[in-house]
Image (cartoon, rainbow, N blue to C red):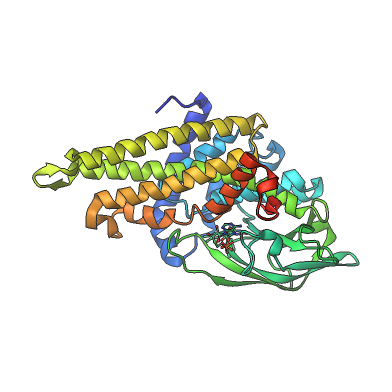
Amino acid sequence: MLPRDFTEEQIMFRDAYRQFLAQEIVPHMEDWREAGIVDRSAFRKAGEAGFLMIWPDEKYGGIGDNDFRFEQIITEETAYARVADWYNTLHSRLVGPYLTRFGNEEQCDRFLSKCVSGECVLAIAMTEPDAGSDLAGMRTSAVEADDHWVINGQKTYISNGINADLVIVAAKTDPDNNPHHMTLFLVERGMEGFERGRNLKKMGLKAQDTAELFFTDLKVPKQNVLGEVGHGFYYLMEGLAEERLIGAAGYLSAAQLSYDLAAEYVKERKAFGKPVAAFQNTQFKLAELRTELDLAQTYVDQCVAAFNGGALTAVDAAKAKLVTSELQCKAADIGVQLHGGAGYMDEYPISRQFTDARISPIYAGTSEVMKIIISRDCLGDDYAPFNTRNF
Ligand SMILES: Cc1cc2nc3c(=O)[nH]c(=O)nc-3n(C[C@H](O)[C@H](O)[C@H](O)COP(=O)(O)OP(=O)(O)OC[C@H]3O[C@@H](n4cnc5c(N)ncnc54)[C@H](O)[C@@H]3O)c2cc1C
């Protein structure tokens, strides 16, 4: 692999975070997988150790350094330690930045310190039973009334849905039903009319609580409107580019782990009197994978540098998400195949690599949606089959 660009401080940060995971998170993961939810103490411990939401200003307890490489390190190490179902990155880097980017000072003062310490766990709720890729098709609505808004509707597949104390909820707010007129609301634990449904059982990422949320005549004070009324859709589109980049860093690290697990196994396992590593098929499969991993890493690192320089586009992020999420699945699939029957057994880590990987080309925008974004950039809007500005 080509040399990667991290500072001395970031290399030390990586070591310290790896140790934190080994001591505080990895030993509990099996229990949390059984329970279908990570214990909230994980967020508190990470907050205390300075590994949860690191980027906010020092006055909120962060380090005030917005260098994305810190987050890249956290995501890579989390995936490589096989604890990606502790969805700390969703809290820290997918949802948290909405508060500073679109929120006002009063909202930042109210919530940010608690988010940094892990006392307040975050989630974001866009998807509904009838609206996922097509966000503009959502039905949850909010109606203005005196000093508050009244929200009715439901969301599904919401990560951290059970643990969350503060949920950014997207709702339609145009009485004339303009599909893009959405607003983001800060919905807090305990607000009357906010109920959680099932913690959904999943194929992989078993410790991540992925839940249904219900809103029935939920009164949200106006001070909990995030940003401008009616701008929510565009805020989500802006947030998704960053979400896709942080996702890409994790998917690639998970793919790297699948490669390492496979490379290790084939040296040990013997068939026809030889290590499986001695078969040319094995060598070519791993050589191809190694090359794709290295190429993807260079692209993702360049995207991170572009993000740091304020130059990352939604299209760049879509390409990174598309390639890395598909590569994560491919690496896990090759890994299982090279393990033979052992690869299908729970006790071999490659098995879980396979089931955990399957969601990556689906959430945060499916591979098909990424291709729509990229092809719009290649060919222009004139050839779009429908209004692709919905992504
Ligand atoms: C584990 C998990 C965690 C999640 N966490 C969150 C969360 O925290 N917050 C949140 O809001 N959501 C979350 N989601 C939802 C996730 O983002 C959606 O599932 C995803 O965007 C896809 O939407 P959908 O499931 O409705 O699929 P659909 O939109 O129904 O898509 C079904 C299929 O049709 C394809 N398709 C759709 N439109 C087109 C088109 N125009 N052209 C070609 N193909 C198309 C899709 O690519 C897909 O293959 C999560 C989902 C899961 C499974």
Most extreme residue toward the right is: 146
Most extreme residue toward the left is: 273
Q: Residue 258 at what x, y percent from top left? A: 35, 46
Residue 346 lies left or right of residue 388; in this view the side is: left
- What residue appears at the point 36 percent right and 56 percent down from the top-left corner? 352
Please say whether residue 340 is visible from this viewpoint: yes
Q: Is residue 388 above or below residue 316?
A: below
Image quadrant in which the N terminus is located: top left
Q: Is residue 358 above or below residue 268?
A: below
Ligand 1: quadrant of the figure: bottom right
State which quadrant residue 212 falls in. bottom right
Name the residue nearer the viewer: 166 or 239. 239
Q: Residue 245 at what x, y percent from top left? A: 57, 42
Q: Residue 96 at what x, y percent from top left? A: 66, 48
Residue 359 lies left or right of residue 192; in this view the side is: left
Name the residue nearer the viewer: 68 or 10. 68
Q: Is residue 176 above or below residue 20?
A: below
Residue 372 lies left or right of residue 336; in this view the side is: right
Please say whether residue 80 is visible from this viewpoint: no
